[in-house]
Image (tube, rainbow, N blue to C red):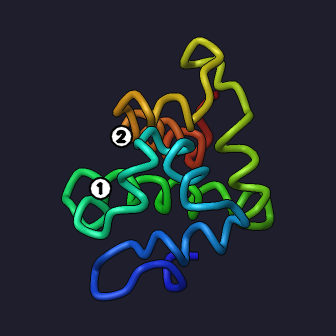
Amino acid sequence: MYERVIQNDRVLSNALAQTLHVTKSELAAAIGLSADSSRERERERSGPTQRRMRDVVEILNRVSHWTGSDMQAYAWYRSEPLPAFGQRTASDLVAEGLADAVKTHLSRIAVGGFA
């Protein structure tokens, strides 16, 4: 997925939304951003918006190796409760600014740790 949605070191929200089969507004909601951030070009290119989208791409890339597809990884991201985080989903955690915690959690699982 990474190669399809990143160009010139920027996440392309149109490409990411298309890859996940969602609208840009749905994508914004799934990563904890306002719908305006997906519609306004300047806000879409801002550091915080780009960082949030890049975090999601990194998480989905890690999970897609386990789930078998980008769509399954996105379904996991949106709906799988994570016991280590009080049953919140990865989407909930990213929206709260805790993407690094999700990535650390996934790294632990990748080396054989418990979820």
Q: Given this view, does label 2 or label 1 mark the residue nearer the observer?
A: 1
Would you place residue 97 above or below residue 47 in this image? Answer: above
Label 1 Cα neighbours within 10 Å, binned few <14 / some 14-19 / many ≥20? some
| Residue type pointed to by label 1 | Arg
Q: Residue 80 carries which label?
A: none
Looking at the rendered structure, the secondary structure element under dot 1 is helix
Looking at the rendered structure, the secondary structure element under dot 2 is helix
In x, y percent, where is residue 87? 65, 17
* Quarter holding residue 66: bottom right
| Residue type pointed to by label 2 | Asp
Q: Residue 100 carries which label?
A: 2
Q: Residue at x 58, y 58 (%)?
A: 60
Q: Residue at x 40, y 40 (%)?
A: 99
- Specify whether 101 is left or right of 92: left
Q: Name the foreground residue: 42 vs 61.
A: 42
- Specify whether 107 is left or right of 22: left
Q: Which residue is disc 1 drawn over?
A: 51
In x, y percent, where is residue 36? 38, 51
Q: How many marks?
A: 2
In x, y percent, where is residue 37? 36, 53
In the displayed orientation, state which residue is furthest to the top. Answer: 86
* Quarter holding residue 103: top left
* Quarter holding residue 4: bottom right
| Mark pair 2, 1: CA separation | 11 Å
Q: Residue at x 73, y 35 (%)?
A: 79
Q: Residue at x 59, y 76 (%)?
A: 1
Label 2 Cα neighbours within 10 Å, binned few <14 / some 14-19 / many ≥20? few
In x, y percent, where is residue 95? 44, 34
